[in-house]
Image (cartoon, grey):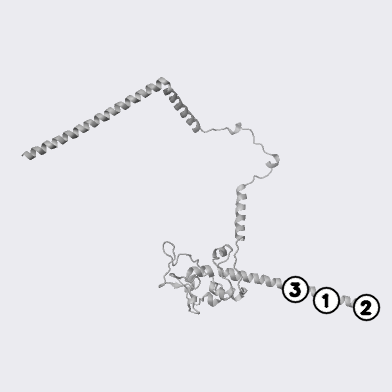
Amino acid sequence: MGTRRKKNEASIAAEDVIQDTEHERELDTSGYEQMREQRIRENKERMHKLGLLGLSLELKKKNEKSQTEKKRKITIDASSLPPQRRSSRLSTLEPVNYLDFFGKAKRESSSKEKKEVKIYIPEGKAPEVYTEEQEKLLGDCETVWELFVDGYDEDGERIYDPIKGETCHQCRQKTLGQHTGCNNCELLHGQLCGDCLYMRYGENVMEANGNPKWTCPVCREICNCSRCRRANGWMPTGNIYRKVLKMGFKSVAHYLIQTYRSEKSMEGSDAENTVAVKESETSADTTVNRRRRRRGLRS
């Protein structure tokens, strides 16, 4: 019984303490509010005595008026304006459309950029020559091959696998993805990945694998990999696929063979023209000499 009484007395005492603290807080807050209101009243009285209160109200009204004036739109009657001065010489001419002018300049600059694309391949030990038969053996495709997708992961990174991957004869990389198989040699140099086959030869790997008569670029003697070019005495081309596309060629092989053959044909036509000119000059010289001899005999 004694312990219960002690507990009850302790709890009552604690409740009394809590109530006293709350009452003190209320008194403190009410006292603070009263002091704050008194200070505000005193400050207003001081401003009123000094004449600052009326001045602040006037400035506030002026600011509000200036803001409303800025918001108003200024409308000018076109009929009240004087007529535009225009030269009689210019009035007869058609107005210039500067959009067309700038569009034309932009088109001309883009055409200049296409013309300015240059490809430099160092000169090798042997002259780079292609035959008409090699030009006929250039590949083609019916469907466009999407680059940098086959054999790549979700992040766009190429998947290299030394165990399951297949080696590409062109880029020398052992990767996953589709590779060609030559029906003629059936050797390792007949394996090309889809990207290399499309960029370097303009062919689709799926169409090549579906064609039972397909032969690799090495068997067709049109391979332009660095190893085969060095074996022929030519320097490697480097990565020129984007430049080749800008110049209007389908692939690197099309650029090399068609460009070098056209240059050789032009050189041949120039040589034929020079030979024809020399023959005409020699024939003219012989006729002149004959005439001189006849005149000498007559005299």
Amino acid at circle 1: Thr
Name the residue carrying label 3: 276
Crowd rating for badge 2 (residues with CA inside 10 Å; few <14, some 14–19, many 20+): few
Task: List x then y, in percent, for residue 291.
Answer: 87, 75
Name the residue carrying label 2: 298
Asked whether the beta carbons under mark 1 and mark 2 sit within 8 Å of each other, the answer is no
Crowd rating for badge 3 (residues with CA inside 10 Å; few <14, some 14–19, many 20+): few
Q: Earlier in the sequence, mark 1 or mark 2?
A: 1
Taking the spot 89% from the left edge, 77% from the top edge, the residue there is 294
Viewer-closest of 25 and 240: 25
Task: List x then y, in percent, for residue 239.
Answer: 54, 66
Viewer-closest of 42 and 141: 42
Name the residue carrying label 1: 286
Horizontal placement of 2 versus 175: left or right?
left
Viewer-closest of 131 and 232: 232
Q: On the image, which quarter does residue 87 sit in?
A: top right
Q: Which quadrant does the N terminus fall into?
A: top left
Q: Secondary structure at mark 1?
A: helix
Q: Is residue 30 above or below residue 116?
A: above
**What is the residue that sits farthest to the right in this orientation?**
299
Q: Earlier in the sequence, mark 2 or mark 3?
A: 3
Task: List x then y, in percent, for residue 65.
Answer: 47, 28
Amino acid at circle 2: Arg
